[in-house]
Image: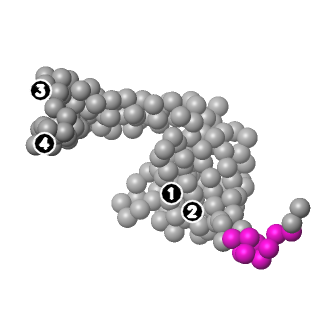
């Protein structure tokens, strides 16, 4: 077996070091999904369904511009396919993603949540403060981030040491919110 060359070692030094990693508890994900769903306006999902269907119908219109290559399907068939596609994009894909596990990773300069094909990255410099809220089966880490100080919720299983996460965040100049101490 060949020893590592210098270029491989330099690549390893560029990769960020992972300090913490855990899977968010299923009970937390269920509550968080319900909370996110409750924040939506009643008309937003039907509206996005219609917009998606209209965009899919634009494909049918473009096919009609050159009918000699392949004749387009009838209008009613195209409408049914477009509406079904819009329903799938707005309701089906989020349902599939809600069934995916979620993983939290803390790196040197940022943290990341990976759920399905969605990666949410937050730099520590964007976090104003954090606080803990506990339950029997899991703990919630609430981060205040961005210019508008929006809450970002992370589910933390009971096996993860809060003291270790506190020390890690404090080392990155992220301070605990005064009311939670």
Q: Which residue is mark 3?
A: 75
Q: Which residue is mark 1?
A: 121
Q: Quadrant of the N terminus?
A: bottom right
**Cα distance between the residues tagged 3 and 1:** 43 Å
- Contact check, label 1 and label 2, Cβ < 8 Å: yes
**Cα distance between the residues tagged 1 and 4:** 44 Å
**Cα distance between the residues tagged 1 and 2:** 7 Å
In this view of the protein, can residue 139 be seen by the observer? Answer: no
The label shown at residue 110 is: 2
- Work out whether mark 1 precedes mark 4 in sequence or the reverse, and give the earlier one: 4
Q: Which residues are magenta?
A: 3-11
- Residue 77 quadrant: top left
SS class, disc 4: loop
Residue plotted at (72% across, 48% down):
161
- Work out whether mark 3 precedes mark 4 in sequence or the reverse, and give the earlier one: 4
**Cα distance between the residues tagged 4 and 2:** 50 Å
- Work out whether mark 3 precedes mark 2 in sequence or the reverse, and give the earlier one: 3
- Residue 158 quadrant: top right
Q: Which residue is mark 4?
A: 66
- Work out whether mark 1 precedes mark 2 in sequence or the reverse, and give the earlier one: 2
């Amino acid at each position: 077996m060949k020893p590592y060359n210098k270029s491989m070692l330099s690549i390893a030094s560029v990769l960020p070091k992972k300090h913490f990693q855990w899977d968010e508890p299923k009970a937390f994900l269920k509550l968080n999904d319900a909370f996110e769903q409750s924040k939506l306006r009643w008309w937003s999902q039907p509206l996005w369904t219609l917009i998606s269907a209209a965009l899919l119908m634009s494909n049918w219109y473009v096919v009609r511009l050159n009918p000699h290559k392949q004749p387009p399907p009838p209008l009613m068939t195209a409408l049914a396919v477009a509406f079904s596609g819009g329903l799938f994009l707005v309701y089906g894909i989020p349902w599939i993603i809600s069934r995916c596990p979620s993983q939290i990773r803390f790196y040197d300069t940022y943290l990341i949540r990976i759920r399905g094909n969605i990666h949410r990255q937050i730099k520590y410099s964007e976090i104003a403060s954090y606080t803990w809220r506990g339950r029997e089966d899991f703990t919630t880490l609430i981060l205040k981030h961005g210019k508008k100080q929006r809450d970002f919720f992370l589910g933390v299983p009971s096996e993860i040491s809060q003291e270790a996460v506190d020390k890690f965040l404090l080392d990155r100049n992220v301070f605990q919110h005064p009311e939670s101490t």
